[in-house]
Amino acid sequence: MRNLRYDWTISEIEKIYNLPFPKLILRAMTVHRQNHKTDEIQGCQLLSIKTGGCPEDCAYCPQSAHYKTEVEREQLLSVDKTLEAARNAKESGATRFCMGAAWRDVPDGEQFEQVLEMVKGVRELGLEACCTLGMLREDQAEKLAEAGLTAYNHNLDTSPEFYGDIISTRVYDERLKTLENVRKSGVTVCSGGIIGMGETKLDRYKLLQQLSNQNPHPESVPINQLVKVEGTPLQDENDLDVFDFVRMIATARIIMPQSMVRLSAGRLQLTDEAQALCYLAGANSIFMGDKLLTTPNPETNSDAELLDKLGMKLFAEATA
């Protein structure tokens, strides 16, 4: 396919990331225009269907059982409550509904069956259905595919080298294995990362290389900015420079031309002007609703007002 490569080198990615800002944005806009509608973005909504108590020790996550945060444990939501939230999301303009559960591994049995019912119900509403449930076996991925799952999210978070500084309860290869299982099932892959966790620029290039050298590229690439939460090890991390965030989005757009680049966690920390720069850089999806799992997110009204100012709009309907 035109523009698609799976052999990006670190030096190539570094050169793109560090282009003079006007050149970087122009190049990203050009690639974006060749592959997507530039005045439309997809609205997604993410619901935490099982909150807190996760045995993982991800340093950024308030849902980890290892840290004392204000997030309280909640059991798996009922199918009815989940589908009610999905209907509300659709009314707000979302075309993709994502369900997240704070598990290390997807559990077999009644809870997994309940998630399969949620997926079926979301699809029946005419929405794309996405799940992020932790590590996934091949047979579980196949069952999710049979239920109609559109996408499975499993972020790589950062570079392989920096990963151990952020998480000790699993290894990078386990992340890659889950993505492989998802790909085998025919479900599309949603995988990105988080910046602002104390990583170097080289770590960012290596994360982008891991994502862009997958064949095919992940259909969805969420770019998250660290949301600092009291009680987590990263609560006092230095603020991220907004231009680094925009550069990350622009570089992802250039090296993964056909992927949906999703402006994800940390959006509340961005001004309207910064968000507009992200759209110029190639971001074409946002997460709506007042929360992104357990962290604050801009309200739907403020999103609508900004898109209106920019002469942009949300996708009218799901694409899958």
Image: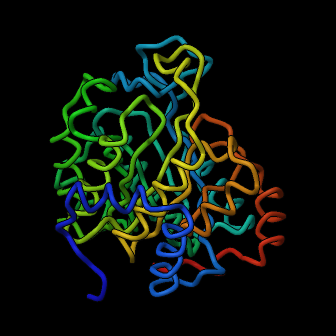
Q: In the current view of this chain or complex, which residue is farthest to the front? A: 20
Q: Is residue 136 above or below residue 250?
A: above
Q: In the current view of this chain or complex, which residue is farthest to the top? A: 68
Which one is in front, 249 or 151? 249
Q: Residue at x 27, y 41 (%)?
A: 159
Q: Is residue 25 above or below residue 224?
A: below
Q: Is residue 271 left or right of residue 320?
A: right
Q: Residue at x 64, y 47 (%)?
A: 267
Q: Is residue 119 above or below residue 38?
A: above
Query: Which of the colour schemes (rainbow, by chain, secondary structure, one colour) is used?
Result: rainbow
Which one is in front, 320 or 85? 320
Which one is in front, 249 or 284? 249
Q: Can residue 109 be seen here?
A: no
Q: Residue at x 47, y 28 (%)?
A: 61
How far across and how far down the image is residue 298, in percent? 73, 48
Which one is in front, 214 or 140? 214
How far across and how far down the image is residue 204, in percent? 35, 45
Q: Residue at x 42, y 53 (%)?
A: 131
Image quadrant occupied by the C terminus? bottom left
How far across and how far down the image is residue 113, in percent? 36, 49
How far across and how far down the image is residue 87, in percent? 67, 62
Among the 4 quarters of the image, the one containing residue 257: bottom left
Q: Is residue 215 left or right of residue 260?
A: left
Image quadrant occupied by the N terminus? bottom left
Among the 4 quarters of the image, the one containing residue 10: bottom left
Q: Can residue 277 be seen here?
A: yes
